[in-house]
């Protein structure tokens, strides 16, 4: 490998701010923030969603109906391809 052309690959702490979950992984992402985690200082990257908070991975998927948009969509497209249960009308 040539010297000086590759980004710095190091351990980084990712912090899911939605549920205060932190994990260490290796990354080349640039960040100015630092955090002490498990007795060692690491670069910090704040994220909105991780596997700990994403509805697909947690099984807490919910449909938020705003002004009947879900009903309007179901009337227009029916249940084709729907993975959620449709209530009897």
Image (spheres, grey):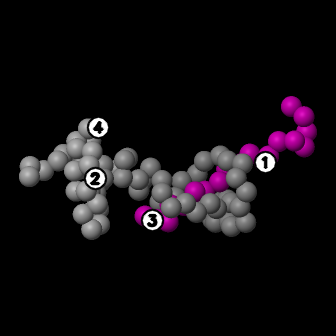
Q: CA distance from mark 1 to mark 3?
A: 28 Å
- In terms of sequence position, does the residue under pointer 3 or pointer 2 come before the other? 3
Q: Label 3: which residue?
A: 18
Of labels 4 and 2, the one closer to you: 2
Disc 2 target residue:
73
CA–CA distance in space, label 4 to label 3 = 30 Å
State the residue position of label 4. 81
- Percent x, y for residue 44? 64, 62
Q: Residue at x 41, y 53 (%)?
A: 54
Q: Residue at x 60, y 48 (%)?
A: 25
**What kind of element bears circle 1?**
loop
Point 73% across, 66% down: residue: 32
| Element class at badge 4 | loop
Q: Nearer the viewer, residue 67 or 18?
A: 67
- As helix, strand or loop, the secondary structure at mark 3 comes to loop
Question: Where is residue 69 shown, x and y percent of the image?
Answer: 29, 60
Q: CA distance from mark 4 to mark 2?
A: 12 Å
Of the two numbered discs 2 and 1 in the rendering, the one whose residue sits closer to the viewer:
2
| Residue range corresponding to the magenta coloring | 1-20
Comes first in the chain, label 4 or label 2 = 2
The location of residue 68, given as percent across then percent down, is 24, 63
Query: In terms of sequence position, does the residue under pointer 4 or pointer 1 come before the other?
Result: 1
Q: Is residue 9 magenta?
A: yes
Does 88 sit left or right of 60 as displayed?
left
Image quadrant containing the N terminus = top right
Mark number displayed over residue 8: 1
Question: Does 73 sit left or right of 57 as displayed?
Answer: left
* Circle 1 or circle 3, nearest the eye: 3
């Amino acid at each position: 490998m040539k010297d000086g052309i590759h980004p710095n690959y190091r351990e980084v702490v990712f912090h899911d701010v939605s549920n205060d979950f932190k994990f260490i992984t290796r990354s080349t992402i640039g960040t100015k923030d630092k955090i002490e985690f498990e007795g060692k200082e690491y670069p910090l990257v704040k994220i909105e969603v991780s596997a700990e908070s994403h509805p697909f991975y947690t099984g807490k998927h919910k449909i938020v109906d705003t002004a009947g948009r879900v009903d309007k969509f179901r009337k227009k497209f029916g249940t084709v391809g729907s993975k959620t249960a449709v209530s009897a009308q």
